Image (cartoon, helix red, strand yellow):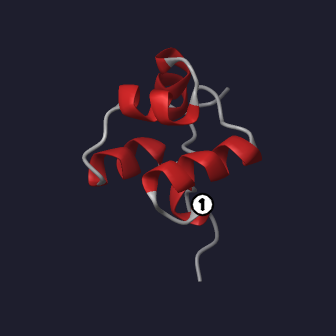
Amino acid sequence: MSDKVFNRIKAVLAENGKANKWLAEAVGVNINTVSKWCTNKIQPSIETLFEIAEALDVEARELLVLRKKT
């Protein structure tokens, strides 16, 4: 995959003072998976994105990078 940034999971975790390990436990995945999400090496499924948003108490759209300039 390219070096493009598709999600803001790492940024939102930092904004909320949460660690990768916390998110891994909250959504029931391996910490290595969370690390790959945070570095945009892989992307979570839509269902998982909503689970992440719920765990972080944010809207799912806050986890995505805005592509279209308004």
Q: Quadrant of the C terminus?
A: bottom right
Residue flagged by tag 1: what amino acid is it? Ala
User: Residue 48's image quarter?
Assistant: top right
In the image as oriented, which residue stretches furthest toward the left? 17
Left or right of 53 on screen, residue 42: right
- Please provide percent x and percent y for residue 42: 64, 28
Above or below for 42 versus 53: above
* Residue ID at (58%, 76%): 69
In the depicted view, which residue is nearer to us: 60 or 4? 60
Q: Position of residue 21 (x, y in %)?
A: 38, 25
Q: Position of residue 14 (x, y in %)?
A: 29, 46
Q: Residues within 10 Å of mark 1 (few under 14, many from 20)?
A: some
10 vs 50, left or right, is left
| Secondary element type, mark 1 | helix
User: Which residue is labeled 1 in the image?
Assistant: 60
In the picture, which quadrant includes the N terminus?
top right
Q: Nearer the viewer, residue 21 or 6?
A: 21
| Residue visible at 55% across and 55% down in the picture | 54
- Answer above or below: position of 45 versus 39: below
Residue lying furthest right:
46
* Count of residue discs: 1
Residue 24, compared with residue 65, is above or below; it is above
> Which residue does the image show at 58% across and 27% down from the upper left?
28
Q: Nearer the viewer, residue 21 or 32?
A: 21
x then y, percent, for residue 62: 51, 63
